[in-house]
Amino acid sequence: MHKVLVSACLLGQPVRYDGRSKGIVSDWLKALGAEGRVLAFCPEVAGGLPTPRPPAERQGERVVTEGGLDVTAEFDRGALLALELCQAQGIRFALLKEGSPSCGSGRIYNGCFEGQSVAGEGKTTALLRRHSIAVFSEDQLPELASALSLAVNAAGA
């Protein structure tokens, strides 16, 4: 039974920088949770950042707040804790919040606090992918469902 690491904010937990959530409505994800296959995780909170917190964006390998505070260590710590959880639980799939400096899988903000996104990935996504954990965004639920189905079928074959 394959478990999925899921951004806590996507599950309705108010852990985002602004103290809110970005909960998604998905019967499929709800069913996965009911089967005990969802592990909620927020790398930013796990890394030691409070909620709410100043918005932060990636600037190369660094992550800084709009006020210039370097929070790279907290982002790196959260990414490492996410990886350790995945490794301990045998998790090979993650559903993470697009656009986040931790969790973005296809795009992140440009680092200038202008509201402009660019192609890129967050710190947690990058680390998970380097360790062969497939990362999907909330816009890719069908792709994640398909990947999970293929993994289940391959394991059962």
Image (cartoon, grey):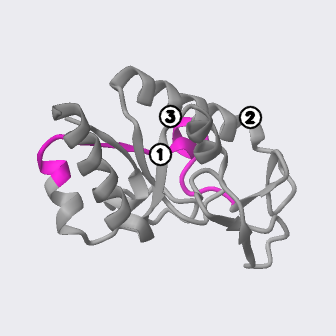
Vertical placement of residue 75 versus 17, above or below: above
Q: Is residue 67 left or right of residue 94?
A: right
Element type where label 1 sits in the image = strand
Looking at the rendered structure, the kind of residue marked 2 is: Ala
- Which one is in front in this view, the residue at disc 2 or the one at disc 1? 1
Residue at mark 3 to residue at mark 2: CA–CA distance:
14 Å
- Image quadrant for the C terminus? top left
Dot in front, 3 or 2? 3
Residue 134, labelled with which disc?
1
Type of residue at label 3?
Ala
Task: Quadrant for residue 90, please give it.
Answer: top left
Q: Label 2 neighbourhood size at 10 Å, few (<14), some (14-19), many (20+)?
A: few
Residue located 66% across and 55% down the image: 121
Please give the residue where the numbered disc 3 appears in the rendered image. 82
Would you call the spot at circle 1 few (<14 residues within 10 Å), some (14-19), or many (20 or more)?
A: some
Q: Nearer the viewer, residue 8 or 132?
A: 132
**3 with respect to 1 (left or right):** right
Query: Which portion, as a residue range, is magenta?
Result: 32-54
The image shows residue 45 at horizontal and vertical percentages of 53, 43
Q: Which mark is residue 144?
A: none
Q: Residue at x 59, y 29 (%)?
A: 80
Q: Residue at x 56, y 53 (%)?
A: 103
Is residue 48 visible in the rendered image? The answer is no
Q: Which amino acid type corresponds to the residue marked 1 in the rendered image?
A: Ala
Which is nearer the eye, 54 or 35? 35
Residue placed under numbered mark 2 in the picture = 73
Q: Is residue 41 magenta?
A: yes
Mark 3: secondary structure: helix
Looking at the image, residue 57 lies above or below residue 110: above
* Furthest residue toward bottom: 115
Q: Earlier in the sequence, mark 2 or mark 1?
A: 2
